[in-house]
Amino acid sequence: MERKTSWLCERFCLLCAAVFCGVISVQSILAALGSHPLISAAGGVCAAAVLVLAVRFWPMGDRNTCITLFLVRFGLAMAVILLIGAQPVQDFSTMYTAAQDMARGGRDYLENVYYYNWAYQTGFVFYESLLLRLFGPGQLSLQVMNAVWLGGTGVLVFRIALRLLPRRAALGASLLFALYPAPYFLAAVLTNQHIAAFFYYLAVWILLGRKELSLPRAALAGGVIALGNVMRPIGIILVLAALCWAAVEQLLTHRERWGRAAAKLAALAGTYFLVFSLCSQAIVWSGLNPQGLTNNQPMWKFVLGLNPDSSGGWNRTDYDSFLSLPAQEADQAMRQAVRERLGAGPAALARLAVRKSAVMWGAEEYMFWGFGHLDGQRRFGPATVNQLVQVLCSGDKGVYSAVFLLALAGAAALLRRGSGGQGALLPAFLLCGYYGVHLIVEVQSRYRYFLMPAVFLLAGFGLAALTERFYNLRKDDL
């Protein structure tokens, strides 16, 4: 019975991952064809060239590869920061202003209702204020640390890939991730996505150790996820994905007794909640925010995500209708709106889900955050800034489409042969959980940032399968 249950859970997860990758691939290719198909095709060709380089000719050992990947991502990020820069707008501006006030020892930012409604942003503001205290005023120190986190995440993707894939496939996926353009569009933006992604994939690396998961490692991973959650509160998705992965692999392999396996799951979840609760209390005790790291408008993302008129995106109508109300009234009104929107019927919700998927996953990157401060009509040689930005965006779409096609191939290969209890299910569960959550909450293209390393890991399985070397390449094969 356990074997049948585990087989069904594994295959269902991999089937969902394959379906989601297929839907995203189709929507992404359609978006590319409707914009600048030749530029997108060129991006896809460049992606193929990178894979050939990695699979056939990459000369470096693992240590030098880690250094190279870090330097490539750090260097590209710094180039964007120094040559293009960015000006904080909207939420980024609100948090940067609060960080400046906090660094001076002020608490004027607490008068902004933003830090009551979304008190959980205080953790990232505190991080920014520490850098401002250490290095002085100005955005540069924050942006340089963005580059550090970007470089570190690139190394983590490679180290995780080595634990899941033959070395050549791990190289291909990791080098392609290092050259994937989209993260660099946000390199100079004061977003919490860079640091949060580093902590979340550090936790994945801890979980997928070379040896069997131990109780201390499970607890450590939970604590690291909590630190990521302090920066950007999506850690519960990773916790649930990790719990599902560990439970299914236990059913598949029976490596240990269920009591010990359950203790590890409890350590992971318990440490996550404990560390996050302590961090929240520390924010209260320090006087940084009496609300701690709470979300006092938990329905807001659902209200936006279920709005059919905006295809699940941010819109002024909902903002004016709900957030202008007193907090308690706003919460009640939003709960009523969510009930009404969920009551639209299966057909309407399905149509909304398809549109949301196209906005979140199929559309081109939204370039305003990193390039909106530039004069779009300024000329660089034969082209304007707007035209050059469009070239970057369309080229990115080619790489993005190629990666999801490889991830589709990887999920299909795993579905055919099974995951083998070697950790492959964790990125698949991450994909399913994150894609599923964004069928009901607010969507925008930059939110896909968190999931992309997991997509590249699945793409590594596709690369291994398509080169027909999955079974005869050892993980240490040079």
Image: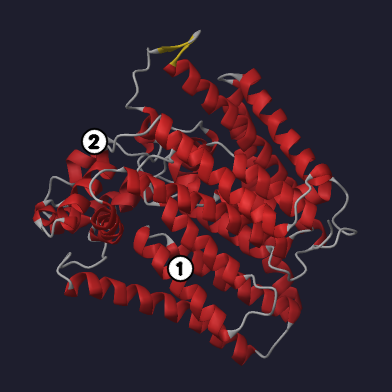
Q: Residue at x 68, y 59 (%)?
A: 63
Outermost residue toward the right?
472
Depth order, front residue of 262/310 = 262
Of the numbered discs 2 and 1, the one sitting upstream in the chain is 1
**Are there few (<14), some (14-19), or many (20+) residues within 10 Å of tag 1?**
many
Q: Which residue is mark 1?
A: 225
Q: Is residue 127 left or right of residue 60?
A: left
Q: Residues within 10 Å of mark 2 (few under 14, many from 20)?
A: few
**Could you say which quadrant of the image residue 466 lies in?**
top right
Residue at the spot of label 2: 317
- Give the label on residue 181, or none: none
* 160 over 371 or under it: above or below: below
Residue 103 in the image: above or below residue 278: above
Query: What percent of the width, then of the height, locates residue 193?
Result: 42, 51
Depth check: give the residue in front, 350 or 265: 265
Asked if residue 89 lies left or right of residue 232, the reply is left
Instruction: Examine the rendering and report whether any part of residue 423 can be seen.
Output: yes
Callout 2 secondary element: helix
Give the residue displayed 62% in from the left and 49% down from the top: 69
Give me the residue at 24% from left, 50% from top.
Answer: 136
Indicate the amino acid at tag 1: Ile
Q: Residue at x 62, y 53 (%)?
A: 67
Where is residue 435 shown, x and y percent of the image?
Answer: 53, 51
The percent coordinates of residue 478 (x first, y second) are 83, 56
Work out which quarter of the rendered image holds the N terminus and state it: bottom right
**Front-most of 16 and 478?**
478
Residue 388 location (% of width, % of height) = 49, 19
* Left or right: 262, with 59 as reference point: left
Q: How is the image coloured?
A: secondary structure
Q: Secondary structure at mark 1?
A: helix
